[in-house]
Image (cartoon, rainbow, N blue to C red):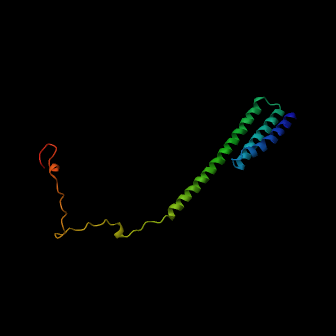
């Protein structure tokens, strides 16, 4: 009876701590953590009350903790897949609302170079000065 009383006292301490201490985690995850701790404590006290071997309550605590961890991981995985699905839907919606560029042929065709006629003025050649006409080897270009 004392063990059950201690277990109830521990549960009464754990639940408010889990509720107020882990503000960053969502409520279902907090209650899952606290619930698995309390369930493990109750089961271990019950198994001690039935006079099982000393390792059986410890195994029960480990088993319930592992079940709680698996459920926590599944909830976390479902939330991540939901967020990923929503992000993918936003990307698809954003890509579908982007206007498609529709340009005319004149805008996309390269500009034609103007034709040179015989009557166009020729560009004057640059005049070279005396020293510029002599190359590196000393000969005139």
Vertical order, 48 against 28 (above or below): above
Give coordinates of residue 7: x percent, y percent.
Answer: 82, 37
Quadrant where the N terminus sits is top right
Give coordinates of residue 109: x percent, y percent.
Answer: 32, 66
> Seen in the image, is 118 located left or right of residue 84?
left
Furthest-right residue in this view: 1
Between 61 and 121, the one nearer to me in the picture: 121
> Seen in the image, is 1 located left or right of residue 94?
right
Residue at 39% across / 68% down in the picture?
A: 103
Furthest-top residue in this view: 54
Give coordinates of residue 122: x percent, y percent.
Answer: 18, 65
Residue at 61% across / 50% down in the picture?
A: 80
Vertical order, 48 against 39 (above or below): above
Give coordinates of residue 85: x percent, y percent.
Answer: 58, 55
Residue at 72% across / 35% down in the picture?
A: 62
Between 91 and 110, the one nearer to me in the picture: 110
Between 99 and 140, the one nearer to me in the picture: 140
Vertical order, 76 against 55 (above or below): below
Furthest-front residue in this view: 130
């Amino acid at each position: 009876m004392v063990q059950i009383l201690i277990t109830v006292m521990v549960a009464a301490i754990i639940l408010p701590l889990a509720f107020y201490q882990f503000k960053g985690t969502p409520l279902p995850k907090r209650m899952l953590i606290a619930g698995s701790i309390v369930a493990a404590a109750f089961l271990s006290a019950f198994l001690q009350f039935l006079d099982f071997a000393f390792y059986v309550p410890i195994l029960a605590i480990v088993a319930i903790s592992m079940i709680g961890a698996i459920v926590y991981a599944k909830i976390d995985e479902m939330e991540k897949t939901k967020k990923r699905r929503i992000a993918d839907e936003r990307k698809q919606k954003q890509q579908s609302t982007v206007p498609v560029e529709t340009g005319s042929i004149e805008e996309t065709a390269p500009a034609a170079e103007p034709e040179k006629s015989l009557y166009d003025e020729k560009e004057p050649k640059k005049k070279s000065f005396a020293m510029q006409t002599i190359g590196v080897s000393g000969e005139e270009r």
